[in-house]
Amino acid sequence: MPQVEPEPETWPEQKPKLTKRDSATGTEWNWEFEESESEGKQPPPGPPGKDAPPLRTDGDDAPRPEGDDAPPLPLEPDVAPRLPLERDDAPLPEEETPKPITVSGHRRRCHTDCLEAPLSRAFQWLGWQVGAHPWVFLLVPLMLTAALGTGFLYLPKNEQENLEYQYTPVGSPAKAERRFVQGHFTTNDSYRFSPSRRSTESNFISLLVVSYSDSLLDPATFTEVSKLDGAVQDLRAAQENGSQIQYQQVCAKYRAGCVPPNPLLHAWQVDKTLDLSSISFPIYNHSGHPLYLTGFFGGHILGGSLGMGQLLLQAKAMRLLYHLKTELPEDDVQSKQWIINFLDQLNNIKKSLALKKIEVVHFTSVSRRLEFEATSQTVVPLFHLAYVFIILFAVTSCCRFDCIRNKMCVAAFGVISAFLAVVSGFGLLLHIGVPFVIIVANSPFLILGVGVDDMFIMISAWHETSLADDIRERMSSVYSKVAVSITITTVTNILAFYTGVMSSFRSMSFPQGIRK
């Protein structure tokens, strides 16, 4: 069968183009073929056209032998044909003499771990020391806590807290204006007491007597009120030296006698024949002396015009206001002692009098302070309960069924560590003379929350360590990982508390609160 030779393929005519390319070894000159619009962007798959330069060979241009004795052709790289101009011994055109290439060094990177790296190294060293000497880091904090805890011996037990001094800003305009008023309108609690001239709150006891009937303006009700008044004025407060404080010693006086708690009651006690059904309000003229009844009667019903006011038909409640001395420091202390004794004996007075027509409600100048102190006492059981709940939460959250990775004891000791920090901090402040203010009774909860938070971070980092490493390596790894987290939380807490120290309130300001 005759062999039919295939027709030679025809290739589109390609025009070579000399191009220059820079590389790390110098300038290279290559032949590139122009692309045809009909063929697209890809180079022609077949042999080059007739105008293409010959391929580069290793020898001369002599024809190679054919057949089995022909040596294998050298493998050419998958690049475009190159001109003899590209040979090593071929000179470059004069106008295209390459310029020397300057190789620049690597750009220096900006390091952002200038703070993290030294912190991690320092904590890593500390963790190594903790793992190498565990008993030192266990016993030294316990001994330090025991030493600083002796500061609780200086904790005041019966010291009375001045709410205005602690919870009002230092140098406020109101205090400056009050000093101006006190300089121009003086008071004298021992001879000429006047409630309207006082610019500060004085020591007082206020009894609100409420009648079970529609009105207390009858002799029977006034008799019970008079008995209550007599029992209050007969009270005596015992002092530590054995002496007693009587009401006549501490009451605010007008001339020779104590200021009466209620002007109308006092007038009735002096003259039992006083007609209570013909009392004018708000001013009652009794034997030529005007009695100002404003603020002493409540729930009243007025009738027609009478004298300097209107007829007082009914009054549901009556107020007894006992003013005590406040001006001198020693009088102020004795007055407060007498008030506290009154609060202790008030229930006994009610039982002994067996009051049937009236109900008695009281309020004193020390009631707010006593409520603050009572609140602090109620915080103590909650403090213990909070520690129990947090220990339970920490223990249960760190519980694992794997006995190796179980960290229940570690969590419990983490909460105990926070408790030791509270004892040490409070003891140190009491040692250097910082007074104990009621508001700081809530700070242990905050300290506990911060300490337990750091404990959870360290336990989480401990779980990421390798079980094959020894204790020192694992501790150093944990400390290095939590260094930045604990440092940031600690610094932010310090800054937050420092803003409180700079406050103008003495209850929060450290320099203002130092004990003299």
Image (cartoon, rainbow, N blue to C red):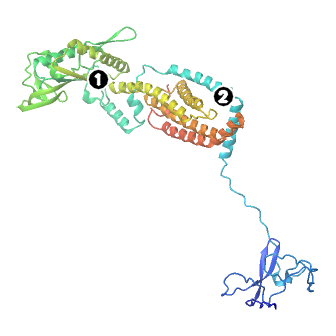
Q: Which residue appears at 11% of the width and 23% of the height?
A: 217
Q: Amino acid at mark 1?
A: Phe
Q: Of circles 1 and 2, which is in front? A: 2
Report the disc number at residue 204.
1
Location of the N terminus by quadrant is bottom right
How crowded pointer 1 is (Cα within 10 Å; few <14, some 14-19, many 20+) is rated as many
Report the disc number at residue 108.
none
Q: Which residue appears at 39% of the width and 34% of the height?
A: 168
Q: Is residue 330 above or below residue 55?
A: above
Residue 108 picture location, percent across and down: 72, 58
Residue 144 picture location, percent across and down: 61, 24
Dividing the picture into quarters, in which one does residue 57 lie? Answer: bottom right
Looking at marks 1 and 2 on the same chain, the residue that comes earlier in the sequence is marked by 2
- The foreground one among 96 and 231 is 96
Residue picked out by circle 2: 137
Dividing the picture into quarters, in which one does residue 203 lie? Answer: top left
Tags 1 and 2 in contact by the CB under 8 Å rule?
no
In the image, taking residue 492 as reference, residue 167 lies left or right, namely left
Q: Secondary structure at mark 1?
A: strand
Q: Which residue appears at 33% of the width and 18% of the height?
A: 340
How crowded pointer 2 is (Cα within 10 Å; few <14, some 14-19, many 20+) is rated as few
Residue 16 picture location, percent across and down: 77, 87
Q: Is residue 423 above or below residue 473?
A: above
Q: Secondary structure at mark 2?
A: helix
Asked if one can make out residue 99 in the rendered structure from this viewpoint, the answer is no
In the image, taking residue 505 as reference, residue 229 lies left or right, namely left
Query: Marks 1/2: CA distance?
Result: 56 Å
Q: Amino acid at mark 2?
A: Phe
Q: Is residue 51 above or below residue 318?
A: below
